Amino acid sequence: MTVRARGPQPSLRLRVARQVIRQTVRRAARSGIANREMTDMQGRPIRWIGPEIRACLAAMDAEAVALRRHARFDELDRFGNRLMVEMAVWTVTADRALRKCGISPESARQVVADLGWNIYRRMLSLTSLPVRLATRDPGRRLRWTIRILLIFPFSAPGSPGYEVQARREGDDLLTHFTCCPPQSFVRRVAEAEGDSDAQESFRRSWCTYDWPGADLIARDASRGHYRRPHTLSHGDSVCDMCWAARALSA
């Protein structure tokens, strides 16, 4: 009998997290896809019903298994870093599954961005809730919440995990990321699979959430609590984020 060699097995925490993320993404996809119009590869409008949605969910499961070989979980020594890469796996999975099931790349990107924002918004609201209850000052809300997030899940042991320099500038908090494990994972997928659409879908989803996310944390009825001149997903060497206590626009 031949014994097949097996690679490092994920920890119990990661296995549990995978199931939670899977169920969360599937639930969001099922309801989100059923309630929206998409376009197929010929640009024709289409609405999916039960059989198409079930086929896409099955394709997502298969994609997730296939794409994890690019994740390099064994190189990440922090659970939070692994957790964020697993979430990126499902972002790319949803995008690729939609396209493989006949949805146009542009429509798939819009679906993934909306589904991802729905999940991200709820997570951010929950994380920032204690801080929002403790203070009404938007600057403190931003600084305290981001400091919490830099402990988990964005803890920064350095490359290949998150690598970030954080400093306060007046009432603002600056976080300059020079390594982002989810973005590194997506770049590997794009290069290995010859799939630039996957990278664009990530950029149009994950890399756009912090603008409304900062306003969600500040909760002072203003917009413009975030700016980022450079982005790793654009090929820059840094994501130079500023979480601005005072809104930059009305």
Image (cartoon, rainbow, N blue to C red):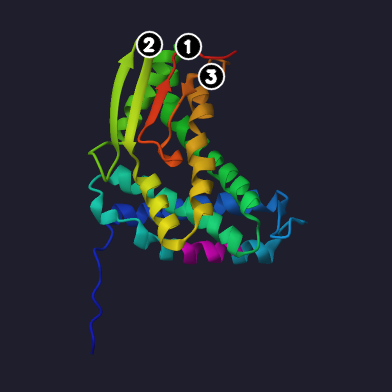
Q: Quadrant of residue 155?
A: top left
**CB under 8 Å between callouts 3 and 1?**
no
Q: CA distance from mark 2 to mark 1?
A: 8 Å
- Dot 1 crowding, Cα within 10 Å, few <14, some 14–19, many 20+: some
Which disc number belongs to residue 246?
1
Q: Amino acid at mark 1?
A: Arg
158 shown above or below 141: below
Real-space CA distance between mark 3 and mark 1, rounded to the nearest whole angstrom: 8 Å
Q: Earlier in the sequence, mark 2 or mark 3?
A: 2
Vertical position of residue 41 compared to residue 211: above or below? below
Element type at mark 1? loop
Q: Residue 143, position in %: x, y?
A: 37, 19
Q: Are marks 2 and 1 in contact (CB under 8 Å)?
A: yes
Q: Residue at x 52, y 35 (%)?
A: 208
Query: Is 168 in the magenta?
Result: no
Provide the residue span drawn in magenta: 56-63
Of the pair 110 and 42, the residue shown nearer to us: 42
Q: Secondary structure at mark 3?
A: loop
Magenta stretch: includes residue 59: yes
Res. 99 visible in picture? yes
Q: Give the spatial CA distance, label 2 vs label 3.
A: 15 Å
**Towards the viewer: 163 or 35:** 163
Q: Which mark is residue 171?
A: 2
